[in-house]
Image (cartoon, rainbow, N blue to C red):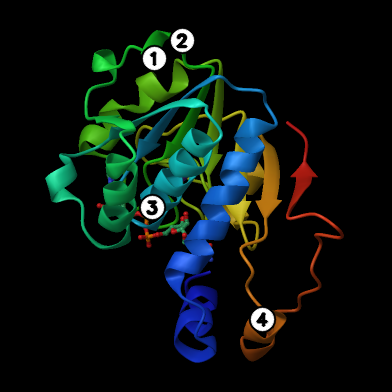
Amino acid sequence: MRDVDRVTVEEVGLQLLSMMENAGRNLAGQVLRRNAENVVIYAGNGGNGGGGLVAARHLSNRDIDVSVVLDRDSSDLDGVAATQHEVVDAMNVAVTRDPAELDAFDAADVAVDALVGYGLSGSLRGEAAELVPAVESAETVVSLDVPSGLDASTGETPGPAVTPDTVVTLALPKTGLKILDATIVLADIAIPPVVYQRLDIPYRHPFAGEYCVELRGG
Ligand SMILES: NC(=O)C1=CN([C@@H]2O[C@H](COP(=O)(O)OP(=O)(O)OC[C@H]3O[C@@H](n4cnc5c(N)ncnc54)[C@H](O)[C@@H]3O)[C@@H](O)[C@H]2O)[C@H](O)CC1
Ligand SMILES: [K+]
């Protein structure tokens, strides 16, 4: 997946922010399908968190009551996550580090888990790990790309990990998802077939007339 991202950005010229926009909009679409009224997005400081913050923007644009919980102070965000945070902050979306501070916390019908994706290294630690019970307290948990704390390649959970109802995984299903009971939805983030060709990955798009396809029910 890292190679797919690299070739897409460096050789084809599609920008990370474009892929992330597709990721976040597809994720928001999956949340909207659940008729959620009150959504809490848990976001970390990487591509995964950035996608979660894009979804926060799309949901807020659709008048959903959405709040964001970060695993660090917003001033400690950098890169794409900082860019996406700046936008939701300007939109007056509630952003906090402490879920108990949110009026919406007890009422959340969907929690979006965008703390860590395939960038996990070792066991889930620090505030991200401490937030796992809060994420799981919502009626429905939707993880972006891979459940936070689960190794995307092996499926191992060397420490705490989110147990989602649904995973919205991006571009290609990650092998580590095989062990989960969750519903797996594959989302199109517009990676062109030439990228897979260059990497000798046999690929035929599975999306038919949609941007998301359910690979496996929970
Ligand atoms: N083609 C695609 O699939 C695309 C995927 N995208 C999304 O980007 C993430 C991968 O982004 P990356 O920045 O490489 O890493 P993460 O966001 O997954 O993680 C970095 C984040 O997590 C923290 N962290 C790492 N290990 C731990 C740990 N053990 N405990 C606590 N915290 C940890 C680290 O400090 C960073 O803050 C991918 O999953 C997709 O969601 C792109 O949006 C587009 C292309
Ligand atoms: K995640």
Closest to the observer: 160 or 13? 13
Q: Distance between the residues labelled 3 and 2?
A: 24 Å
Mark 2 Cα-neighbour bin, 10 Å: few <14, some 14–19, many ≥20: some
Residue mark closest to the camera, 2 vs 4: 2
Three-letter code, disc 4: Tyr
Helix, strand or loop at label 1? It is: loop
**Residue at the image position 65 percent from the left and 62 percent from the top:** 172
Tally the numbered discs.
4
- Quarter of the figure that contains the C terminus: top right
Q: Nearer the viewer, residue 122 or 58?
A: 58
Q: Circles 2 and 1: CB distance less than 8 Å?
A: yes
* Labelled pair 2, 4 in contact (Cβ < 8 Å): no
Does 139 sit above or below residue 154?
Answer: above
Q: Mark 1 points at which residue?
A: 104
> Any mark on residue 107, and which?
2
Q: Earlier in the sequence, mark 3 or mark 1?
A: 3
Q: Name the residue under label 3.
A: 50
Helix, strand or loop at label 4? It is helix
Tell me if I can see residue 124 in this picture: no
In primary-sequence order, the first of circles 3 and 2 is 3
